[in-house]
Image (cartoon, rainbow, N blue to C red):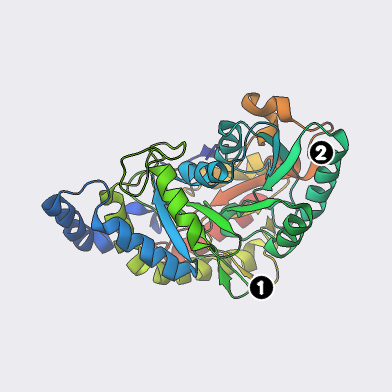
């Protein structure tokens, strides 16, 4: 993620060092099990396409309710593969939020298509369905691009409005593709992320709520027929025997070591998710008085990969909180449409809500190994800095 982050900051406080994300504490909890898994990979020697890949894919599909899951090399690979499978390319418009990591727009451009940036809802920080409809109308009116796909992003773990996007996609004949890079473990209604759209990409970057010990990702589908095509694309576009090229593809495989790590992290994921929810409830109750936390849709449950708060004097608050030993990160300081790589696609007049959020938002420590006293200390620090 593009951010101004103090991830290394862990100044001593009266309640110990506070980490922004504490992977070391998690590793201490699962290290013996992970070592057994890694030893098994060393023993069978199938470092690519080992049995851990199949086991992980089956467990991911079962966990989310998806028809199938395909493990791949990264969250970015997970974004590119379904777009290639759909034949998205030159002359196509793909609608994406500008308030997200650059991988979402990069995936669109790598297919040859054109990203169209959509503003966010100021409460949820996710793509605004009403603004999407206006962008669609503008693109159709201009007549230069063919509206082809929409990629909502579940920012910080909170599912986007798939009820609205499903309706729009159906009416406009768009491929609805969820960027769930941050939201594994999130829910909307009675469905998990992975089963909220026809296709969903997620990331297992180490800092994610479910993270590997390197780059890794996965794609979820509601249609098992997709899985065969996606698996082919991730293996250079080869057939089931991996001999003949039957379509354009690339090396998008996950290795067996990462699958081994993820399998052991999945074993504790629900317990960690419950703790994240408990911490978020305290943050919301206390910090909602002094700032603007992310709101969630009715019936939605965030995975709380990150906890975000907006305040008007963000930079001063962050400096003060850091000085008290509380690490922070800013996601995102620069919206995509204001970055040099994407400036050619910047909408006239900018994106008001996206730009406001970028000037006010920051994230606080969010991981299952914060102690209750540390959580209270973090809240005290923020309240003191804002007042």
**Direction bottom: furthest residue:** 190
Task: State the image quarter where residue 355 is shown.
Answer: top right
Q: Residue furthest right?
A: 141
Q: Report helix, strand or loop for mark 2.
A: helix
> Camera-side residue: 259 or 171?
171
Expressed as whole percent of the image width and height from the top left, the position of residue 375 reads 49, 63
Of the pair 158 and 114, the residue shown nearer to us: 114
Q: Classify residue 261 by image quadrant.
A: bottom left
Up-down relation of residue 111 to residue 280 (above or below)? above
Q: Residue at x 58, y 69 (%)?
A: 281
Mark 1 = which residue?
299
Q: CA distance from mark 1 to mark 2?
A: 32 Å
Taking the view exactly as shown, the residue that stands out farthest to the left is 43
SS at circle 1 = loop
Q: Residue at x 41, y 40 (%)?
A: 237
- Label 2 sits on residue: 139
Q: Nearer the viewer, residue 129 or 244?
A: 244
Give the answer, above or below, for where 337 lies relative to 290.
above
* Residue 164 at x, y percent in the picture: 75, 62
Residue found 48% across the figure and 47% down from its top: 78
Closer to viewer: mark 1 or mark 2: 2
User: Residue 195 at x, y = what percent?
Assistant: 55, 65
- Residue 353 screen position, x and y as percent: 77, 45
């Amino acid at each position: 993620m593009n951010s101004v982050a103090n991830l290394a900051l862990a100044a001593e406080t009266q309640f110990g060092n506070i980490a922004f994300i504490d992977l070391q504490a998690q590793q201490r909890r699962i290290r013996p099990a992970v070592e057994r898994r890694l030893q098994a990979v060393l023993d069978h020697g199938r470092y690519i396409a080992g049995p851990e890949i199949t086991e992980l894919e089956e467990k991911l599909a079962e966990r989310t309710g998806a028809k199938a899951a395909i493990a791949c090399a990264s969250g970015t690979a997970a974004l590119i593969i379904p777009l290639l499978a759909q034949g998205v390319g030159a002359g196509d418009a793909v609608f994406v939020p500008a308030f997200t990591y650059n991988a979402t727009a990069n995936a669109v451009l790598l297919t040859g298509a054109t990203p169209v940036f959509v503003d966010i809802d100021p409460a949820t920080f996710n793509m605004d369905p009403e603004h999407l409809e206006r962008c669609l109308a503008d693109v159709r009116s201009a007549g230069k691009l063919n509206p082809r796909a929409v990629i909502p992003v579940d920012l910080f773990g909170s599912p986007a409005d798939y009820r609205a996007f499903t309706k729009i996609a159906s009416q406009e004949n768009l491929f609805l593709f969820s960027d769930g890079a941050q939201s594994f473990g999130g829910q909307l209604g009675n469905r998990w992320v992975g089963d909220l759209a026809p296709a969903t990409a997620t990331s297992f970057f180490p800092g994610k709520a479910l993270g590997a010990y390197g780059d890794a990702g996965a794609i979820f589908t509601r249609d098992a027929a997709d899985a065969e095509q996606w698996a082919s694309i991730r293996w250079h576009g080869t057939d089931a025997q991996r001999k003949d090229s039957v379509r354009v593809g690339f090396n998008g495989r996950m290795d067996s070591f990462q699958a081994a790590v993820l399998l052991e992290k999945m074993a504790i994921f629900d317990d960690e998710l419950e703790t994240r929810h408990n911490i978020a409830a305290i943050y919301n109750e206390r910090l909602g008085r002094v700032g603007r936390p992310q709101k969630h849709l009715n019936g939605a449950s965030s995975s709380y990969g990150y906890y975000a708060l907006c305040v008007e004097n963000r930079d001063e608050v962050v400096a003060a909180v850091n000085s008290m030993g509380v690490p922070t990160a800013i996601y995102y300081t620069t919206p995509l449409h204001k970055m040099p790589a994407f400036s050619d696609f910047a909408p006239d007049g900018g994106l008001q809500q996206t730009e406001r959020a970028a000037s006010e938002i920051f994230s606080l420590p969010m991981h299952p190994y914060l102690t209750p006293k540390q959580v209270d200390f973090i809240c005290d620090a923020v309240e003191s800095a804002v007042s």
